[in-house]
């Protein structure tokens, strides 16, 4: 095991990898409950979606661990699942069976462009400054996500967002968790993030802010209502509108995953000469997971930024992902315990990891405006648009323009010019009302 995962070479050990894998699972376990609720709005059976979510996450994460050997987990992506339910099914009037078929078609295309290494070429073509910006932007995004989920930042009609109410008891769970985790991190206590989450959960149970689970074990819900439906409705993808849906699923998942992989690779120190080793295997892992997910019955699967929590506690090998995958499988049977891990429990972890990832900003050449402007748009765009892909779009559209203005247009990779036009179309499609 040690030799296969190269634990000594990566300066890690089995204990650290197990802790990292469990930490990653705890940080993203909420998707087991959020995804069924979101897709349930489209009329899908929530029990079946719960099981499909767990199995697709386990499959993709296991592929990422055993095949690509990266400490990166996959699961049905947030945001795109909302697009599936509220834009495609409810907004366009497409039934969920046909929408699932669109995911299936998009996943087939995804695998083809991965086999021909188109995704790999695109990732390698992105300049190092923008890759550092992507990593930092993801950090701000997940920190903002944590602040919002923890109740410290809330919507405000006058100022868009504002400080949350300290009279809300659950908000204090986030505050306690953030204080405990911060102190442990400063003191460099091993497993500080995981310990912080455990302390927060225990405080919540003691105070009654987190309800005690009534059961420990339950059977996994049946997949029958959703299994194979996407394949069965394959022939229904026969209109321009539905092909636009397929294209949107493809583009959003493509750039969300690309941005997440690059950001996580930067955080873990995997990038070499501005390239991510074994990126082709990582991309094949998530595209295969998307295909499996569409067959099982869930929206597109992609790499998860919460993997940064496991990386932050020392996860550096594929063993981290293997542990996370096992936790997802076990999670199907211990579902009554998972509600204990509330948003307030995971929020401090997301905030602290955001701090760690934001450190990549120091490596951007801010003194050169031709790269500083697009880099800044990426960094600030991700949290403010609440989307990794939208933040990337803002920066990658601006990059060729500022480089041409600086008379450095010849230094821009041809693919970056192609992305300029692709992202303009991408934004246009997403903003069609």
Image (cartoon, rainbow, N blue to C red):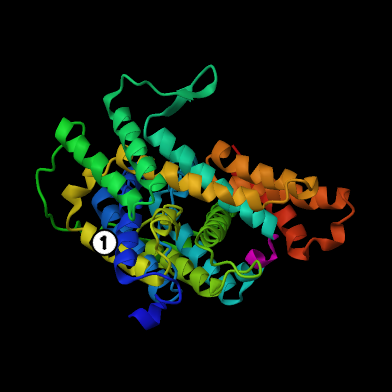
Residue at the bottom extreme, as displayed: 3
Residue 383, position as x, y percentages in the image: 54, 39
Q: Is residue 384 left or right of residue 364?
A: left
Between 270 and 46, the one nearer to me in the picture: 270
Give me the residue at 21% from left, 61% from top.
Answer: 330
- Count every numbered label the image shows and give the total: 1
Q: Is residue 183 left or right of residue 259?
A: left
Between 296 and 3, the one nearer to me in the picture: 3
User: What quarter of the picture does the C terminus occupy?
Assistant: top right
Residue 246, position as x, y percentages in the image: 54, 57
Q: Which residues are magenta?
A: 122-127
Residue 202 visible at all = yes
Between 267 and 381, the one nearer to me in the picture: 267
Residue 314, position as x, y percentages in the image: 40, 61
Give me the residue at 29% from left, 67% from top.
Answer: 15
- Label 1 belongs to which residue? 327
Q: Is residue 32 left or right of residue 267?
A: left
Q: Is residue 126 magenta?
A: yes
Q: In the rendered image of this protein, does residue 143 appear above or below residue 217?
A: above
């Amino acid at each position: 095991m040690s030799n296969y995962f190269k634990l000594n070479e990566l300066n890690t050990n089995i204990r650290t990898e197990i802790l990292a894998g469990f930490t990653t699972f705890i940080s993203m376990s909420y998707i087991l409950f959020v995804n069924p609720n979101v897709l349930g709005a489209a009329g899908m059976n929530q029990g079946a979606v719960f099981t499909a979510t767990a199995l697709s996450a386990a499959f993709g994460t296991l592929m990422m661990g055993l095949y690509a050997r990266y400490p990166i987990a996959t699961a049905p992506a947030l945001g795109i699942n909302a697009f599936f339910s509220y834009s495609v099914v409810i907004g366009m009037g497409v039934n969920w069976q046909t929408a699932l078929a669109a995911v299936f078609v998009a996943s087939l295309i995804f695998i083809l462009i991965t086999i021909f290494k188109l995704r790999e070429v695109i990732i390698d073509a992105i300049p190092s400054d923008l890759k550092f910006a992507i990593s930092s932007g993801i950090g701000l995004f997940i920190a903002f996500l944590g602040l919002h989920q923890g109740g410290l930042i809330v919507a405000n009609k006058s100022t868009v967002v504002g400080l949350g109410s300290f009279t809300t008891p659950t908000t204090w769970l986030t505050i306690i968790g953030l204080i405990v985790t911060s102190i442990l991190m400063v003191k460099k206590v091993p497993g500080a993030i995981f310990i912080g989450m455990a302390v927060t959960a225990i405080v919540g149970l003691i105070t009654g802010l987190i309800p005690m689970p009534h059961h420990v074990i339950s059977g996994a819900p049946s997949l029958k209502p959703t299994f194979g439906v996407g394949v069965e409705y394959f022939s229904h993808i026969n209109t321009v509108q539905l092909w636009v849906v397929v294209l949107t699923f493809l583009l959003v998942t493509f750039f969300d995953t690309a941005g997440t992989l690059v950001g996580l690779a930067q955080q873990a120190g995997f990038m070499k000469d501005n390239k991510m080793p074994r990126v082709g295997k990582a991309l094949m892992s998530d595209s295969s997971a998307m295909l499996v997910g569409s067959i099982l019955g869930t929206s597109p699967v992609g790499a998860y930024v919460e993997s940064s929590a496991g990386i932050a506690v020392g996860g550096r090998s594929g063993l981290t992902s293997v542990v996370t995958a096992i936790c997802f499988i076990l999670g199907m049977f211990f579902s009554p315990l998972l509600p204990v891990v509330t948003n307030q429990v995971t929020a401090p972890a997301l905030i602290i990891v955001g701090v760690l990832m934001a450190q990549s900003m120091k490596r951007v050449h801010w003194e050169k405006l031709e790269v500083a402007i697009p880099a800044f748009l990426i960094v600030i765009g991700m949290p403010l648009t609440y989307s990794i892909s939208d933040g990337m779009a803002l920066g990658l559209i601006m990059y060729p323009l500022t480089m041409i203005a600086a008379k450095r247009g010849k230094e821009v990779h041809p693919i970056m010019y192609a992305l300029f036009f692709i992202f303009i179309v991408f934004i246009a499609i997403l903003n069609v009302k």
